Image: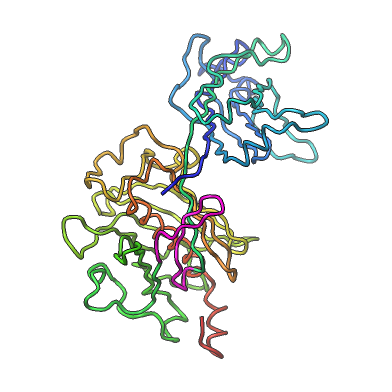
Amino acid sequence: MDPQAFIRLSVSSLALRSPKYLLPSASTSDEKTNSCSQCSCEIKLRGFPVQTTSIPLMPSLDAAPDHHSVSTSFYLEESDLRALLTPGCFYNPNAHLEVSVFCGKKSSSHCGVGAKRQQIGVFKLEVGPEWGEGKPVILFNGWINIGKNKRDGGAQLHLRVKLDPDPRYVFQFEDVTTLSPQIVQLRGSVKQPIFSCKFSRDRVSQVDPLNGYWSSSGDGTELGSERRERKGWKVKIHDLSGSAVAAAFITTPFVPSTGCDWVAKSNPGAWHVVRPDPCRPNSWQPWGKLEAWRERGIRDSVCCRFHILSNGQEVGDVLMSEILISAEKGGEFLIDTDKQMLTVAATPIPSPQSSGDYSGLGQCVSGGGFVMSSRVQGEGKSSKPVVQLAMRHVTCVEDAAIFMALAAAVDLSILACKPFRRTSRRRFRHYSW
């Protein structure tokens, strides 16, 4: 498998120091001083959404910043680099990475008067030819004066800006998941078959090794049961030889919560993602758990929450991602330890072909960042998921297969979380998918 070139631009070790903005002591009650202890920044790069993050305010002028904290990351493919390196027009001939630092808490207006943040200063770093060389390079590391004038008290910003090559494998389901499509790897205009996807919603046969994990008592296809629950769905990923190398199946049925017609957060549906057990032929072992439910609002969303299972058990599992996907327009399921606020330490995902020792999952180790993304469509649309995997998490074909099973489960969760009344009325007249 040949990866595609991606570049990771990371901004880390953010800190702010200034005699004017030192943290107030416990005895200080000055509201103005307290508001200035709330510092944040907006990080901008042309062509990408603005990212906002907080900045630690140093308690003293000789305090050191956290050199291991990554505040934000941008991921650039070849087309992004070409666009950034192409001269612009008018006031911005050259692209810049821009970090705008603010003091004070941003709040909504009251009676027409809003509490404005005070801008302390701006750091700019011009995009240069070294961005496209595909080599690790530190673009900036250290303290820099950003105060606009003497009244800013000599404010200094600390940051570390680094470029790292971050190649990815890109895959696509060639048809909707329910039609058991082929999965190809994309490399420019070249499509290379890698896997096949087999979807079913039938009762598991007695000879199927997944039967040991199957919690559904029925096939979930009868009209009466489908009105109130969706269960028995299964996806198997096969390699080119026809061997099953990963699978995902519903373990907790998708059912409407009491008093409503949708799957609510109080009772989410769930999938288990499994892999072949290397020690026992024709057996499977759990790898991850995906929960999904519908969030109701002005625009409905489907929430997907994914855990890695420690030692194959749900006790001590590690939350890797919790993403809202628009039920109407679709969106992107993402595992990225730089962008996710996790309730436990972020760690690299263990390889499906690893030794099975997950003791380090709860420990903070290096090697985080982007792991996986899967773009899916909304309800009623032809979804052909596009999946990107960080090359450093894929050492063999089987490693990629487990993520394909997870991507298929995310895609099918959009359908499984569809309000029940819409399907039941239609099925009452004409039973079809």
Residue 100, given in percent of the width and then of the height, sits at 66, 26
Q: Is residue 206 above or below residue 112?
A: below
Extreme left residue here?
Answer: 280
Extreme front residue here?
Answer: 190
Q: Is residue 269 above or below residue 307?
A: below
Range of magenta residues: 177-196
Extreme right residue here?
Answer: 90
In front: 86, or 16? 86
Give yes or no for residue 195 being in the magenta stretch: yes
Q: In this view, does 121 lie above or below 378?
A: above
In front: 105, or 206? 206
Q: Is residue 68 above or below residue 297?
A: above
Q: In which quarter of the image is residue 364?
A: top left
In front: 196, or 19? 196
Residue 111, given in percent of the width and then of the height, sits at 79, 41
Query: How did the renderer colour the structure?
Result: rainbow
* Image-based side of 31 in relation to 317, left or right: right
Residue 384, given in percent of the width and then of the height, sits at 53, 63
- For image coordinates 40% across by 65% down, the residue present is 196
Q: Quadrant of residue 231?
A: bottom left
Numbered circles on residues, count: 0
Give yes or no for residue 132 being in the magenta stretch: no
* Image-based side of 76 in relation to 273, left or right: right
- For image coordinates 48% across by 26% down, the residue present is 136
Residue 163, given in percent of the width and then of the height, sits at 52, 28
Main secondary structure of the magenta stretch = strand
* Image-based side of 390 in relation to 247, left or right: right
